[in-house]
Image: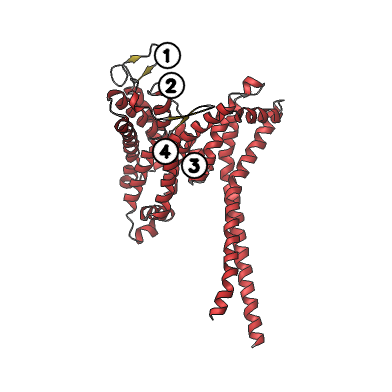
């Protein structure tokens, strides 16, 4: 009996290794397929407008390989990665937090205001600013969480409406005499007071410019994200609730508390989205503060399949497209909007690609199980004949 078990172990390990390798390939196939389809569609559009798509992609690739473009790409990717992580945390719970846009803008506004009002040592100032941003983002997301668990309001509807309300709140607070002292002499725009020098997050000097030191914190957040979801009881409860609230409740999980907690954590992470630019570059919140990062995070999370490594690659791709897009009208007769077309089609195609890959993977699993059962039946029949 022991010999038979020992002899079958290598076969089992080989079978499991093949399954794992195939799962990995299927996981990679979906986003790659989405990007390829997006490139093909963009190429057809360029050809239809009488332009050479190969020249456009060559311009983007050549400029993207320059050191300054690489630094700019990494800086943007840091912000996009945080946006994707914030959205993915809700997605892993099967919650669609569409409100990261409003959450990060409010978080950045309050963080900039507090940072401009106090002047503490850096080891106190920077954590204070980050905590304020996370508290504001989490509190704003908590509104949608409370509405869902107490009144059954869909988080999609509530967070979309909260985005509009957040925009109005920012407009009401960012006025002279409230959060803004007056118009900037240099830009003639309304903005908060410049934050204290002690709030400046460190940067890494490179040949291509200053690289945000926030990229290190983003990596730590990504690792913590994965460890919490895969190695803790909270992460298990979160994923179980996302798969089936009924089954989770039957196993003793407080579903309402998990929903509310997940929304708050997602919002707190969203509060960090504006911090790389705020603490490393602008040092104030004004009318020109970058908008749309929350919606970019949704696309990045979808393309990255809600995993830190996938989100990192998706953030790099989106950042590369954004950085190199400005060169298309400068170095050739190409519309800059073609990059927006590529990004939009990636989002559409990735949903279709994931479904196609999922169906193919399910079919392959059924075939493998059928083949294994047939082999076991044939082996049993041979043993009966031999007996």
What's the residue at 28%, 28% (across, down)?
120
What's the residue at 38%, 24% (across, down)?
283
Q: Residues within 10 Å of mark 2 (few under 14, many from 20)?
A: few
**In front: 356, or 76?**
76
Q: Circle 4 — which element?
A: helix
Contact check, label 2 and label 1, Cβ < 8 Å: yes
**Residue 77 image offset from top left, x and y in percent:** 50, 34
**Residue 46 image offset from top left, x and y in percent:** 68, 29
Mark 4 and mark 2: Cα distance apart in space: 25 Å
**In front: 100, or 185?**
185
Q: Circle 3 — which element?
A: helix
The first of marks 4 and 2 along the sequence is 4
The first of marks 2 and 3 along the sequence is 2
Image quadrant containing the C terminus: bottom right
Determine the residue located farthest toward the bottom in the rendered image: 387
The first of marks 3 and 4 along the sequence is 4
Apparent side of residue 24 relative to residue 168 in the rendered image (left or right): right
Looking at the image, is mark 1 or mark 3 nearer the viewer? 1
Q: Residues within 10 Å of mark 4 (few under 14, many from 20)?
A: some
**In front: 63, or 201?**
201
Q: How many marks?
A: 4
Q: Name the residue beneath numbered marker 3.
A: 301
Query: Residue 288: which disc?
Result: 2
Q: Name the residue beneath numbered marker 1.
A: 187
Q: Residues within 10 Å of mark 3 (few under 14, many from 20)?
A: many
Contact check, label 2 and label 3, Cβ < 8 Å: no
Mark 1 and mark 3: Cα distance apart in space: 35 Å
What's the residue at 59%, 54% (across, down)?
359
Q: Circle 2 — which element?
A: loop
Q: Residues within 10 Å of mark 1 (few under 14, many from 20)?
A: few
Q: Name the residue beneath numbered marker 4.
A: 217
The first of marks 4 and 1 along the sequence is 1
């Amino acid at each position: 009996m022991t010999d038979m078990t020992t002899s079958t172990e290598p076969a089992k390990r080989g079978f499991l290794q093949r399954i794992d390798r195939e799962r990995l390939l299927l996981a990679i196939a979906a986003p790659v397929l989405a990007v390829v389809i997006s490139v093909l569609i963009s190429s057809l559009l360029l050809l239809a407008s009488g332009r050479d798509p190969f020249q456009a992609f060559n311009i983007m690739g050549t400029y993207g390989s320059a050191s300054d473009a690489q630094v700019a790409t990494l800086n943007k990717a840091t912000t996009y990665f945080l946006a994707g992580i914030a959205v993915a945390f809700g997605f892993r719970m099967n919650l669609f937090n569409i409100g990261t846009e409003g959450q990060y803008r409010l978080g950045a506004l309050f963080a900039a205001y507090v940072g401009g009002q106090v002047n503490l040592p850096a080891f106190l100032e920077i954590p204070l600013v980050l905590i304020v941003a996370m508290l504001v983002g989490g509190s704003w997301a908590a509104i949608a969480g409370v509405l869902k668990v107490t009144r059954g309001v869909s988080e999609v509807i509530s967070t979309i409406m909260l985005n509009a309300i957040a925009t109005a709140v920012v407009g009401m607070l960012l006025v002279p005499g409230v959060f803004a002292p007056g118009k900037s002499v240099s830009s003639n725009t309304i903005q908060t007071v410049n934050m204290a020098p002690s709030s400046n997050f460190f940067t890494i000097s490179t040949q291509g410019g200053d690289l945000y030191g926030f990229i290190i914190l983003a990596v730590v957040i990504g690792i913590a994200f994965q460890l919490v979801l895969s190695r803790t009881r909270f992460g298990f409860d979160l994923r179980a609730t996302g798969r089936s609230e009924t089954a989770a409740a039957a196993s003793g999980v407080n579903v309402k508390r998990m929903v509310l907690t997940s929304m708050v954590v997602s919002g707190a992470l969203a509060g960090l989205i504006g911090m790389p630019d705020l603490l490393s570059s602008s040092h104030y919140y004004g009318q020109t503060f970058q908008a749309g990062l929350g919606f970019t995070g949704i696309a990045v999370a979808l393309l990255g399949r809600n995993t830190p490594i996938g989100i990192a690659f998706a953030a790099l791709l989106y950042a590369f497209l954004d950085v190199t897009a400005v060169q298309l009208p400068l170095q050739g007769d190409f519309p800059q909007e073609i990059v927006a077309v590529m990004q939009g089609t990636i989002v559409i195609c990735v949903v279709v690609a994931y479904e196609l890959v999922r169906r193919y993977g399910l079919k392959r699993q059924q075939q493998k199980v059928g083949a294994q059962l047939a082999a076991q039946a044939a082996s049993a029949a041979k043993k009966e004949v031999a007996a």
